[in-house]
Image: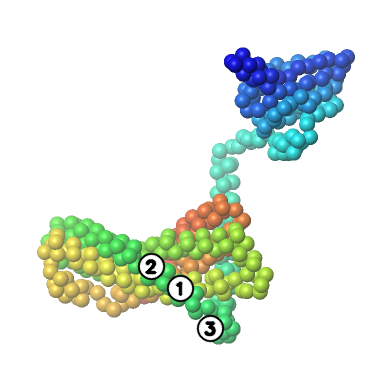
Amino acid sequence: MIDTADSARSAHRASFRVERQGRLSQLFAEGEWTVRDAPRLDSELGKLDIADANEVTIDGNGITRLDSAGAWLLVRTKRDIEQSGKRVREFLLPEIYAPLLNTIEQEHNAPPVVLERRHGFIALVGRVGRGTIGTGQQGYRMLGYLGRFTIELMEAIFQPRGNLRVAALFTQVEEIGINALPIVGLLAFLIGIVMAYQGADQLRRFGAEIFTINLLGDGILRELGGLVTAIIIAGRSGSAFTAQIGTMKVNEEIDALQTIGINTFDVLVLPRVLGLIIALPFLTFYADVMAMIGGAVMCYFDLGITVPAFMRQLHEAISMNTFLVGIIKAPVFAMIIGLVGCFEGLQVERNAASVGKLTTRSVVEAVFLVIVIDAGFSILFSILGL
């Protein structure tokens, strides 16, 4: 039985032989040309010697089984022969393997990649230049997108034709606002604790622990409450906008909406951006409250300041302007996050990699713009004395 099995395997083993007729060499391939014998065949084909032949015929009619590894070896052998200046007169294979051979020949038709040696400094300057031009173009497109959003919004308000879909708007308010309460509240509470602890640690050196409450009031209500909430929402909802719209574009759902005459801006962009503009101020207020609660808890356990004393000092430390300075920035942050998220979603190409790439880009752009606008607000309020 063992001898029979060994003889059967040897009968199917891949092999080739070369026969010469004058200036013509014939390469006969036989057996199972599969990945199992590919290393051996690769080594043996590398030693193939047809130096005195002008023409070569490759006859693979004796092949009983062929996979992509074997097909590639045959194709590579053919190309090596042609590159050596010989002509391949015929390349014969059983008809059943013709599609596989054609695929291998087409997919390996590209020339080898040659990496160009570049001067390091010149390459750096080139990357900086391309990045600058790309940033300028991106800003120009986003500016045009902002203009379209303004026009669509004005039409929805002053010339209503069913542009604004109220059900979709409230769905977005629920998704962006109500569903985000746990994560926003938890992070704001922890930020209040951290600020109170760090502030008290520094002010204790001067015997001014009570002014930790002033630090909390100004820091949270004017800056951190709105800024941290906007960053959380940019990562949570802004990325979701890009991924949702981008996936619709990959699945050609947006093309289907345009085909049946639906304005995709009204359906996809307006409800999301307006929902975010409505929800973010309330989330900012909620974050302010949770951060102050966290600060009060830390002041009680670390400094022994009771809640009534905390509230009295907070009342003296802040005014309505302090609260309004933080809240008034929230709608602006919301519009930036929403527009960037939807804009990048509409830029997605029809592949999964583009969805991930532009989702990441939307978060980075939204966070960057939020921080830049917040810095601008700080300078403006400082000039106005608010």
Cβ–Cβ under 8 Å for marks 2 and 1 = no
Relative to residue 277, is residue 128 depicted above or below? Answer: above
Q: CA distance from mark 3 to mark 2?
A: 27 Å
Relative to residue 269, is residue 29 depicted above or below? Answer: above
- Left or right: where 37 falls relative to 236: right
Per the image, the residue denoted by label 2 is 179
* Residue at screen point 38% across, 62% down: 232
Number of numbered callouts drawn: 3
Relative to residue 65, is residue 47 depicted above or below? Answer: above
Please name the amino acid that badge 2 sits on: Asn
- Where is residue 335 shown, x and y percent of the image? 47, 70
Number of the label disc, if any, that sits on residue 241: none
Per the image, the residue denoted by label 3 is 157
Please name the amino acid that badge 1 sits on: Thr
Q: CA distance from mark 1 to mark 3?
A: 19 Å
Mark 2 crowdedness (10 Å alpha carbons): few <14, some 14-19, many ≥20: few
* Residue at screen point 63% across, 69% down: 257
The answer to whether residue 139 is visible is no
Per the image, the residue denoted by label 1 is 171
SS class, disc 3: helix
* Residue at screen point 51% across, 67% down: 339
SS class, disc 2: helix
